Amino acid sequence: LWRLHRMHHADLDIDVTTGVRFHPIEILISMAIKIAIVLAFGIPAAAVLIFEIALNATSMFNHANVTMPAWLDRIVRLFVVTPDMHRVHHSILRAETDSNFGFNLPWWDRLFGTYRAEPQAGHSGMTIGIPMFRDPAELRIDKLLTQPFRDDAGKI
């Protein structure tokens, strides 16, 4: 699944578009899982719509290229994943990528020990992206769509 999801992490700058930047196959897999759950549990269409609106809104929020005042971020991240908190997860450093997985609620990372308050280099010094996809040419749509099928940049 990482090969599909890394398209989302290959972005060299985080902004609201990163929150909707997913490989089409990843989207289809996600849709299939959600449809199966909806059918299995008979979830009402209105509830699904509300869930999807909330999911997409929080995705755009926590990928937004904004910085809240530190005092406010410390309070808000107790209840929802903030942009600064989630940005750490998009670091080029593996130890940081493997942290702050939370998408909406921050409690899971604290519970499972994957919470990281700040990146090692600080937010202004941190590098976003994936080591093998640093060349802006790798961010063209044709390259993004073939990423899951390549072992490294340029090789299929």
Image (cartoon, grey):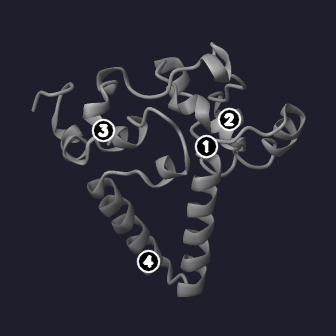
Dot 3 amino acid type: Leu
- At horizontal 51% and vertical 21% (from top left) the residue drawn is 127
- Cβ–Cβ below 8 Å for labels 3 and 1? no
Residue holding disc 3? 139
Seen at 28% across and 38% down, the residue is: 3
The amino acid pointed to by label 4 is Ala
Task: Tell me whether circle 2 and circle 4 mark residues in contact (CB < 8 Å).
Answer: no
SS label for mark 2: helix
Residue 20, percent from left and from top = 46, 55
**Label 2 or label 1, whichever comes before in sequence order:** 2
Instruction: Please tell me whether mark 3 sits on a helix, a strand or a loop.
Output: helix
Task: Find the distance from the CA under tag 3 to the CA under tag 4.
Answer: 38 Å
Residue 119 visible? The answer is no
Distance between mark 3 and mark 1 Cα atoms? 25 Å
Quadrant in the picture for residue 68? top right
Q: Disc 1 to disc 4, how far (Cα)?
A: 25 Å
- The residues tagged by marks 2 and 1 sit, at their Cα atoms, a distance apart of 9 Å
Apparent side of residue 2 relative to residue 137 in the rendered image (left or right): right
Residue occupied by mark 1: 102
The crowd level at tag 2 (other Cα within 10 Å; few <14, some 14-19, many 20+) is many
Left/right placement of residue 142 relative to residue 110 reads: left
Report x, y in % for residue 28: 30, 63
Q: Which is more foreground, mark 3 or mark 1? A: 3
Q: Earlier in the sequence, mark 1 or mark 4?
A: 4
Foreground residue among 151 and 136: 136
Circle 4 sits on which residue? 40
Q: Residue at x 69, y 49 (%)?
A: 105
* Residue at the disc numbered 2: 85
Q: Earlier in the sequence, mark 2 or mark 4?
A: 4
- Residue 56 against residue 86 in the figure, above or below: below
